[in-house]
Image (cartoon, rainbow, N blue to C red):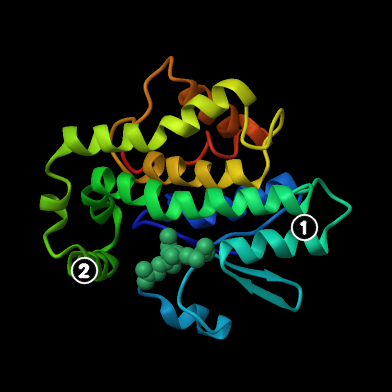
């Protein structure tokens, strides 16, 4: 699997790649990850698109983290399900939309000025240019109102926080792929940015710790750029 890396190849911080790594681990499937940088579009051109994750499974080339999750459930149906039913998959799709339309944008305002610092020179220039064009301002300006951004994140997290407090995981007593979608967002911040977004005692911090410990500490052991 092609996996986004920082200048330090051990720093793997893509929220989408984390979804797929957790999904593969949930299925009990071993994976070899290939560090990939934003500007290495040529090396994944064979996949017909320009983003990671890209999963190679024998002859199969699977792109897009959601497609990868569906592919894994379809192909490895005898292993633990990422979604145990059509209903769970539809609810998970809502979580995907919420994560991408509300959670990621709220997180970006807190972490994007750190992310650019962990990239190598070529990737840093590409990342700054593309993201500043999208935001219409410098990354540093975009991250300036930290208190306001933290409050916006907190309000975005309120429904998730009060849910996991009752149900344990989005999947119920045990995690399903919806948990990995949201885990990917927090792991993105953990691996690529300074400080901590969740305070001890927060039910979400507990939820994140439990997910980080799964699969022999796959998430917990992942190197952070700002240790
Ligand atoms: N919908 C895709 C999104 C993947 C995606 O945006 N990946 C980012 C890394 S986090 C990427 O490859 N970006 C390339 C770029 O910005 O040029 C998925 O779920 O896999």
Q: Is residue 13 left or right of residue 154?
A: right
Nearest to the observer: residue 181 or residue 123: 181
Residue in the image at 39% along x and 39% along y: 190
Q: Is residue 59 left or right of residue 94?
A: right
Q: Find residue 40 and report its horizontal and vertical position in percent.
A: 41, 75
Q: Is residue 15 left or right of residue 196?
A: right
The residue to which callout 1 is attached is 73
Estimate how packed mark 2 is, as few (under 14), some (14 to 19) or many (20 or more) residues with alpha carbons within 10 Å: few
Residue in the image at 72% along x and 45% along y: 26
Label 2, secondary structure: give it.
helix
Q: Is mark 1 within 8 Å of ligand 1?
A: no
The residue to which callout 2 is attached is 125
Nearest to the observer: residue 99 or residue 219: 99
In the picture as drawn, the residue positioned furthest to the top comes out as 201
Mark nearest the camera among 2 and 1 is: 1
> Earlier along the polypeptide chain: callout 2 or callout 1?
1
Nearest to the observer: residue 117 or residue 170: 170
For residue 196, above or below residue 192: above
Estimate how packed mark 1 is, as few (under 14), some (14 to 19) or many (20 or more) residues with alpha carbons within 10 Å: some
Quarter of the image with the C terminus is top left
Distance between mark 2 and mark 1 Cα atoms: 38 Å
């Amino acid at each position: 699997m092609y996996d986004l890396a920082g200048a330090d190849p051990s720093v793997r911080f893509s929220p989408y790649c984390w979804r797929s790594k957790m999904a593969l681990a949930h299925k009990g499937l071993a994976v070899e990850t290939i560090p990939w940088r934003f500007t290495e579009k040529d090396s994944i051109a064979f996949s017909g698109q320009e983003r990671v994750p890209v999963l190679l499974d024998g002859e199969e080339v699977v792109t897009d983290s959601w497609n990868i999750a569906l592919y894994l459930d379809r192909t490895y149906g005898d292993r633990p399900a990422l979604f145990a039913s059509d209903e769970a998959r539809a609810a998970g799709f809502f979580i995907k939309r919420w994560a991408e339309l509300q959670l990621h944008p709220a997180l970006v305002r807190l972490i994007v000025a750190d992310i650019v610092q962990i990239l190598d020179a070529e990737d840093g220039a590409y990342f700054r240019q593309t993201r500043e064009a999208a935001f219409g301002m410098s990354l540093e300006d975009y991250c300036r109102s930290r208190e306001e951004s933290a409050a916006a994140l907190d309000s975005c997290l309120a429904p998730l926080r009060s849910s996991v407090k009752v149900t344990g995981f989005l999947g119920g007593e045990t995690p399903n792929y919806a948990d990995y979608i949201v885990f990917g967002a927090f792991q993105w911040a953990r691996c690529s940015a300074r400080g901590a977004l969740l305070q001890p005692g927060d039910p979400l911090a507990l939820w994140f710790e439990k997910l980080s410990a799964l699969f022999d500490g796959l998430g917990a052991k992942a190197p952070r750029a700002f240790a």
